[in-house]
Image (spheres, helix red, strand yellow):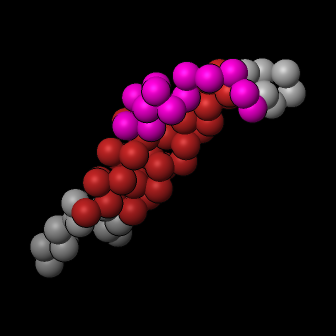
Amino acid sequence: MPTPAPRSRHWQWLLVLPTVAPLLTPFANRLEPTLIGVPFFFWYQIACAVFAIVIITVVYLATREADSE
């Protein structure tokens, strides 16, 4: 039985982005522009959560081991 190839850890560096994005409070600490009446700070935080979901999914799919059958 062949040994599976080692998973690439380079994809995991993408996880830094959703970690740092919500910490940019000097950038996000403002009211304008509003989106459907919601101040920038709040929709930026929601966008960061959606961004994190997308990045975590991409990293998971890129680094999971293939099922060996």
Q: What residue is shown at x 39% (from left), y 62% (from top)?
A: 62
| Residue 67, percent from left and from top | 36, 63
**How many marks do you count on the picture?**
0
Q: Position of residue 39 (x, y in %)?
A: 72, 21
- Nearest to the observer: residue 6 or residue 12: 12
Tell me: 4 left or right of 55.
Answer: left
For the C terminus, the quadrant is bottom left
Decide which of 52, 3 is in the foreground and name it. Answer: 52
Locate residue 35: give its quadrant.
Answer: top right
User: Where is residue 10, by image quadrant?
Assistant: bottom left
- The residue at the point 13 percent across, 73 percent down is 3
Q: Residue at x 55, y 43 (%)?
A: 51
Residue 68: image quadrant is bottom left
Q: Do we see residue 15 in this rendering?
A: yes
Residue 18 appears at what percent x and percent y? 43, 40
Quadrant for the N terminus, please: bottom left
Magenta-highlighted residues? 20-33
Compared across the picture, whether 27 is left or right of 62 comes to right
